[in-house]
Image (cartoon, rainbow, N blue to C red):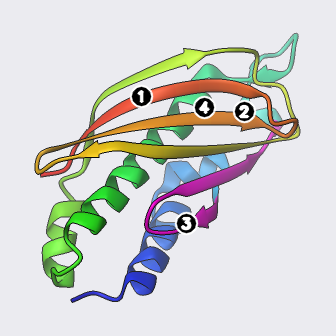
Amino acid sequence: MVNTEELLQMLKEIAEERIPFNKVLGLTVHSLDEEHMQVHFNMRDELVGNFMRGNLHGGVISSVLDLVGGMNAWLGVMKQMKESNLDELVERFIKIGTIDLRVDYLRPGLGKYFTSSGNIMRTGNRVSVVRMELQNDQEQLIAVGTGTYIVG
């Protein structure tokens, strides 16, 4: 059986250090527990999509929502496999991938920083469905998404 705190720390390290694109985006895991996770990133010139308005690029928004959805899928698998050993969990984790991602852009991505979080709607033996959101520093909802992830 795997220590939950050690596994959460490993997931945080993977998200922040092992996935090169997340480093390009400047993502940090703001909070992480067995049920939820939240990431944070600062606005930078490299992330601008509309240079006239200076707002966040839509591809950055969808990428962040997808990351949050995938990490929540990991949490769903972890919860299902509490009694498993590390090798069994790793075997399932490496199979996780996006099947479908829907993003609804609600307003321009303007702000000094952004946070994104997600909630697991359902995790089964094969598929996990997650609802995600992205907010700016004024706690305005910028975008929401629904992701479906293969988990087995």
Instruction: Find residue 60 and name its label.
Output: 4
- Seen in the image, is 98 located left or right of residue 48? left
How dense is the environment of label 4, judged by Cα within 10 Å: few (below 14), some, or many (20 and up)? some
> Pointers 2 and 4 in contact (CB under 8 A)?
yes
Tag in front: 2 or 1 = 1
At numbered mark 3, what does the secondary structure look like: helix, strand or loop?
Answer: strand
Measured in 3D between alpha carbons, the distance from the residue under mark 2 to the one under mark 3, in whole angstroms, is 25 Å
Q: Magenta part of the protein: which range?
A: 29-44
Q: Earlier in the sequence, mark 4 or mark 1?
A: 4
- Alpha-carbon distance for marks 1 and 3? 19 Å
Q: CA distance from mark 2 to mark 1?
A: 22 Å
**Kind of residue at disc 1:** Thr
Question: According to the image, label 3 marks what residue?
Answer: 32
- Which numbered dot is residue 47? 2
Q: Amino acid at mark 2?
A: Leu
Three-letter code, disc 3? Leu
Distance (Cα) linking label 2 and label 4: 7 Å
Label 2 element class: helix
Query: Does the magenta-highlighted stretch encompass residue 33?
Result: yes
Q: Residue at x 50, y 57 (%)?
A: 36
Label located before the other in sequence (2 or 1) = 2
- In the image, 18 versus 133, the foreground residue is 133
The label nearer to you, 4 versus 3, is 3
- Image location (x, y in percent) of residue 69: 42, 43
Position of 38 with respect to 44 (left or right) is left
Which tag is nearer the camera, tag 2 or tag 3? 3
Q: Which residue position holds label 1?
A: 146
